Amino acid sequence: MLKSDGFVVESVQSSPAFHRYRVPKGEDSVLIDLVADPVPALEEPREFFLEGVAILVDTEREILVNKLCTLLERSELRDLQDVRTLLEAGGDLESGLAQAPQKDAGFSALTFAWVLRELPITSLGLGSGWPIEEVASLERFRDDLVQKVAHLAKPELNDESCVGPRRNHPAGPPSSGHSPPPRALMVCLSHPACSRTIPTRGTAGPSP
């Protein structure tokens, strides 16, 4: 359709379930992602009309849940920015965390908080040429979000613990990147009396 309208369409990335295209126009360009999602939608998309053409758009809740799952898988600041925008517009974080496992069976609020805490916002933001003010603002949002998620995840711990600052522990640090190894353990350190080990993504269950 774009090519028939005279646009140049460049393939950037391609896989069986994902295609990314770039559509340049002058000095600007637009990235278009096409995703074959095997997971059913939580809510039916809404129909909108643009210049007489009907298009289906995911609901805000659907987008929020998708973004929470996406943040668990990749380190892109635009996803965190999108979550901030959705929450500021009235998105329900607690509901989103509760529904995320319906999209990703391995999703855990505690693992999400751990991954989010490790996100290198400063290096990613400054490396992309972001203003220092926006980097600092996104870091503050991230820190606040981690605490909120940890608070909402307390039922997973069955105590008053939450995700705290980094600290060396017998389980050792993550291997590389932000994804913990399959059997890695995270220790909750924000509460002095807490010594529980929390299984991260991929573990079979809580440690005894």
Image (spheres, rainbow, N blue to C red):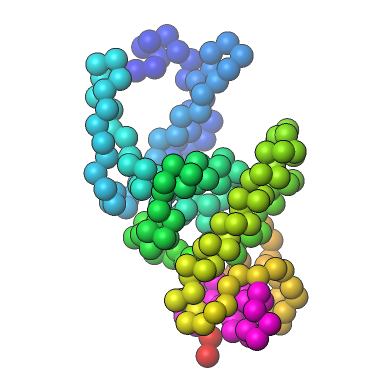
Name of the residue lying farthest toward the bottom: 208
Q: Is residue 87 above or below residue 110?
A: above
Q: Where is residue 177 in the image (x, y as percent from the top left)?
A: 66, 57
Q: Is residue 27 visible?
A: yes
Magenta span includes 201: yes
Q: Nearer the viewer, residue 37 or 28?
A: 28
Taking the image as shown, residue 128 lies to the left or right of residue 144, namely right
Q: Give the range drawn in magenta.
A: 184-206
Give the overall secondary structure of the magenta segment. Answer: loop
Magenta span includes 95: no
Q: Nearer the viewer, residue 172 or 131?
A: 131
**Residue located at (71% from left, 75% from top):** 172
Q: In this view, does 9 lie above or below 135?
A: above
**Residue located at (65% from left, 70% from top):** 164
Q: Where is residue 174 in the image (x, y as percent from the top left)?
A: 67, 67
Instruction: State the quadrant of the N terminus.
Output: top left
**Residue located at (47% from left, 47% from top):** 87
Q: In this view, does 108 lie above or below 63?
A: below
| Quarter residue 198 falls in | bottom right
Taking the image as shown, residue 155 lies to the left or right of residue 192, namely left
Q: Nearer the viewer, residue 131 or 114?
A: 131
Q: Where is residue 23 in the image (x, y as percent from the top left)?
A: 50, 20
Q: Can residue 79 be seen in this view?
A: no
What count of labels does the image hold? 0
Taking the image as shown, residue 39 lies to the left or right of residue 156, namely left
Q: Position of residue 42 (x, y in %)?
A: 29, 52
**Residue located at (36% from left, 48% from top):** 61
